[in-house]
Amino acid sequence: MDLEEAITINRISTQNGPIYLLIGWQAKSFETYIYHEENVWKGKFSSNRLSGFSKNLQMTESAYFAKVKNCLSHQREDYLYELKSGFFYWKRILKSSVIIEGFLPVELEVSPSISRPDLIEVLLALNRHLHEKLGIYKSKIKNIKTEYTKCLKDTQEFLHLKNGMEKALCDKFLNLLNMKKNDIQMLTAYNSCSSVRKKSPTICSTNLK
């Protein structure tokens, strides 16, 4: 899993104001830090909780987990988010009802702040990673352009060579046709002369010349 997929940071609006979700994603679970004003809550969504919610919503675990990741990695207008009474909820808004699609217990962090993940440091690390990834993509694009230019040049040279060979072949074919044509004309004239040779040898000799 790539870094920007393994760690997401999202600003979400709630009834109590905006919160920031820092989530570390794993295969079938995730841990989150919720930043609201000066407070930080920590919680974990376990694989057992994943199994329970997916069964309640009649979804496969992979489909449900993908939906949760999409819901918590981006602010969704069709969802409500609540941080209330030691729980964090995400609820889907339907036309006439609201469905709780998931929640997890969270605890207020009371340990020294140095032990918590620093939001700015995480953002800087993600930024560095994305910058390095962008550099890799730029290098790959440059190599692709170089290969494309080389292939284009080789193709143009091949087409030029192909056209030259076709022209030379056509010229040879035309020359061969002309030679055959001349041979046929001479053979026709010879046959004509042979039929009249006995009658007029002089005319035959003149035609062959």
Image (spheres, helix red, strand yellow):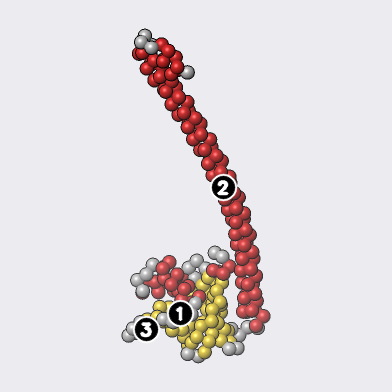
Say which residue appears at 47% left-offset and 32% top-offset: 174
Q: Earlier along the polypeptide chain: callout 2 or callout 3? A: 3
Do residues under tags 2 and 1 come within 8 Å of each other at their CB atoms? no
* Cα–Cα span, label 2 and label 1: 52 Å
* Cα–Cα span, label 2 and label 3: 63 Å
Q: Is residue 42 at all visible to an observer of this figure? A: no
Q: Amino acid at mark 1?
A: Arg
Q: Which residue is more in the foreground, 49 or 4?
A: 4
- Expressed as whole percent of the image width and height from the top left, the position of residue 61 reads 41, 68
Q: Amino acid at mark 3?
A: Val
Q: Is residue 55 above or below residue 164?
A: below
Residue topped by disc 1:
76
Q: Which mark is residue 89?
A: none
Q: Quadrant of residue 57?
A: bottom left
Q: Is residue 65 left or right of residue 154?
A: left
Q: Secondary structure at mark 1?
A: loop
Q: Is residue 17 at all visible to an observer of this figure? A: yes
- Expressed as whole percent of the image width and height from the top left, the position of residue 114 reads 67, 80
Q: Secondary structure at mark 2?
A: helix
* Cα–Cα span, label 1 and label 3: 14 Å
Residue topped by disc 3:
98
Q: Amino acid at mark 2?
A: Gln
Q: Earlier along the polypeptide chain: callout 1 or callout 3? A: 1
Q: Which mark is residue 156?
A: 2
Q: Which residue is more in the foreground, 122 or 146?
A: 146
